Image: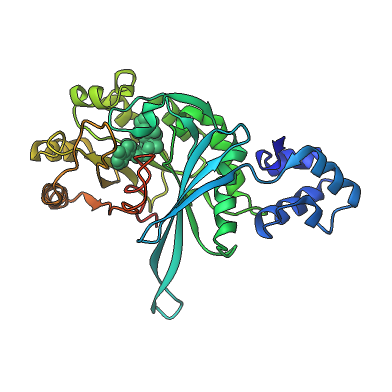
Amino acid sequence: MKTILDFSKKELEGMVKPSFRAKQIYEWIYKKGAVEFTQMSNLPAAMRAELTKNYTIDSVREVKCEISRDGSKKYLFALHDGKTVESVLLPMKEELSDENGELKRHARYTICVSSQVGCKMGCAFCFTAKGGFVRNLSAGEIVGQILYIKRANEIPYERRVNVVYMGMGEPLDNFENVKKAVEILKENDGLAIGARRQTISTSGLASQIKKLGEYDLGVLLAISLHAVNDELRDKLMPVNKAYNIAAVMEAIREFPIDQRKRIMFEYLVLGGVNDHESDAKTLVKLLNGIKAKVNLILFNPHEGSEFKRPAMSDVEKFRDFLRSKGVTCTIRESKGLDISAACGQLREKVKYDNA
Ligand code: SAH
Ligand code: SF4
């Protein structure tokens, strides 16, 4: 059965009469956390029955949830056809000043979602790549991961939630559905997660980055760079043969971005492969003139992987070099390393300051 989460509010307005019912349905699902249409007490009984006959609310079913000692939770979800994807909830503290200028700590959450079952991109270090591509997720299957996690963890409606498209799949290879998910999540009568709190992470599909820029949705962009010369990047990320580093950098330079925001560059540090000072030097040159922040991710080894985890001291050296040249750089902590590494990618990269 089709999930109602697939519909934008506008589409829903075209489907139900009178159209203000769409707002009520949205509020029930996204604000009040209804799990059945029968709960929607201000809808006519006939409409509730009709909706129940044709649609489900949830698009994902929890199969497993692993809780890490650091508080992150990794979910395995089954979709309607039995295919599975992963999502991660990362609780974190953020510091905000109140109206008197006093520093207050608030709980904040980042939810990392999958955009495809599998992935076509074939990156050498990635566990998802091993299984190949299975299918795209629909917009409702993306939105459903967030809705489920918010509800299951009783995260209050007003609590700030960031979304990162850093789970399984290449979001820009599922362009239309990801764009629609961004828009559904933004909806004020829905979850109201602004585009500036949503980050799309891409392996560098330059033409799609351009297309995304033209829509000017307001989403943030993260680029998985991982290598600073084409020779190495070709080997690590086959997508580089279609869009090399120069093509990716050109697309990024044109990408519209909020004055206060930066483009995030993810750099997966592979021990002995891309962690030399010469790499750091070239990276500084590449980023010249771009409002960038670099997020160094420690490679998370998985079964059968040919790479090794870098030494922390090398990663720190790399970071210190970038900083000495004025490049903002952080090292991503290993979140949830004690929970099973099925996906091989969901744990270390997500916690970064979206503000
Ligand atoms: N396809 C998109 C988004 C999903 S992957 C992309 O590639 O950007 C999200 C991030 O996880 C990417 O930066 C990816 O390179 C990284 N990643 C993949 N395998 C990893 C591993 N074994 N350890 C750590 N990070 C990994
Ligand atoms: Fe796909 Fe991203 Fe994994 Fe590369 S790193 S195979 S693009 S999910």
* In-front residue for pair 52/186: 52
Quadrant (top left, top right, bottom left, bottom right) of the C terminus? bottom left
Q: Position of residue 306 (x, y in %)?
A: 21, 30
Q: 1 left or right of 268?
A: right
Up-down relation of residue 337 to residue 82 (above or below): below
Kindly tell me whether residue 202 is visible in this rendering.
no
At a point 25% along the width and 32% down the height, the residue shown is 305
Q: Where is residue 139 in the image (x, y as percent from the top left)?
A: 59, 37
Give the colouring mode of the picture: rainbow
At a point 58% along the width and 48% down the height, the residue shown is 185
Q: 68 left or right of 36?
A: left
Q: Position of residue 320 (x, y in %)?
A: 13, 52
* In-front residue for pair 293/62: 62
At a point 36% along the width and 47% down the height, the residue shown is 340
Q: 267 left or right of 185?
A: left
- The single residue placed furthest to the top in the displayed view is 242
| Ligand 2: image quarter | top left
User: Could you tell me how many numbered marks the image carries?
Assistant: 0
Kindly tell me whether residue 219 is visible in this rendering.
yes
Quadrant (top left, top right, bottom left, bottom right) of the N terminus? top right
Up-down relation of residue 258 to residue 227 (above or below): below
Q: Position of residue 259 (x, y in %)?
A: 39, 50
Q: 33 left or right of 197?
A: right
At a point 41% along the width and 26% down the height, the residue shown is 131
